[in-house]
Image: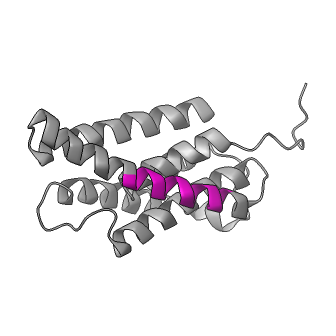
């Protein structure tokens, strides 16, 4: 039987997975995590800077930013996800969600941030390559593959968090 003050194992897989979601859609991972934090499913954040993720205003704002990013992704005006500014945003988003998960399980946020950064950057590069190959091999328009990617992000991120909490 586990006592409440026992430290749980670090959530390596969940943190890397959610950070990978950030590599595909930078706002989706924080928005999904904020939604479960708002419901009260994420413990261990009280008294930390991450506690604000569970507030109504932050959660709503992140949800709107996620939707905006998904719409903008289908336009030709958005730069490559591996361009320096976009990649930096994805890396920071991955660091945020991974550090939050680590802190929620009573582990060092810095370890989670490093894992999240690496996972988000790797996923950004892999996602861009897969989308280009998909367009080339399947002959599908890029926006259609973007919609498919949105579905994977939403389904995968929601399932991952549901299994964790």
Q: Nearer the viewer, residue 90 or 106?
A: 90
Quarter of the figure with residue 80? bottom left
Q: Where is residue 20 in the image (x, y as percent from the top left)?
A: 47, 48
Q: Is residue 39 left or right of residue 28?
A: right
Highlighted magenta segment, given as a residue range: 112-125
| Main SS, magenta residues | helix
Q: Is residue 103 left or right of residue 31?
A: right
Residue at image location 61% in from the left, 34% down from the top: 164
Q: Is residue 126 above or below residue 96?
A: above
Tally the numbered discs.
0
Q: Where is residue 17 in the image (x, y as percent from the top left)?
A: 53, 42
Q: Nearer the viewer, residue 77 or 49?
A: 77
Residue at image location 64% in from the left, 50% down from the top: 101
Q: Is residue 85 above or below residue 39?
A: below
Q: Nearer the viewer, residue 103 or 74?
A: 74
Q: In this view, does 64 lie above or below 154?
A: below
Is 115 covered by the magenta stretch?
yes
Q: Quadrant of the C terminus?
A: top right
Q: Is residue 121 left or right of residue 11?
A: left
Q: Where is residue 3 in the image (x, y as percent from the top left)?
A: 91, 35
Is 147 covered by the magenta stretch?
no
Quarter of the figure with residue 86? bottom left
Q: Nearer the viewer, residue 149 or 8?
A: 149
Residue at image location 74% in from the left, 64% down from the top: 47
Residue 53 visible? The answer is: no
Q: Where is residue 106 in the image (x, y as percent from the top left)?
A: 79, 51
Residue at image location 34% in from the left, 64% down from the top: 82
Q: In which quarter of the image is the N terminus?
A: top right
């Amino acid at each position: 039987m586990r006592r409440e003050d026992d430290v749980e194992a670090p959530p390596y897989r969940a943190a890397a997975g959610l950070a990978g979601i950030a590599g595909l859609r930078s706002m989706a991972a924080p928005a999904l995590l904020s939604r479960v934090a708002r419901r009260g499913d994420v413990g261990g954040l009280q008294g930390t800077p991450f506690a604000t993720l569970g507030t109504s205003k932050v959660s709503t704002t992140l949800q709107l930013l996620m939707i905006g990013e998904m719409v903008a992704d289908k336009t030709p005006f958005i730069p490559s996800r591996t361009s320096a500014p976009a990649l930096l945003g994805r890396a920071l988003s991955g660091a945020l969600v991974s550090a939050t998960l680590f802190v929620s399980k009573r582990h060092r946020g810095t370890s989670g941030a490093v894992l999240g950064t690496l996972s988000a950057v790797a996923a950004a590069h892999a996602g861009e390559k897969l989308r280009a190959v998909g367009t080339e091999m399947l002959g599908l328009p890029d926006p259609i593959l973007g919609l498919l990617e949105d579905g994977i992000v939403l389904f995968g991120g929601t399932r991952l968090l549901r299994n964790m909490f």
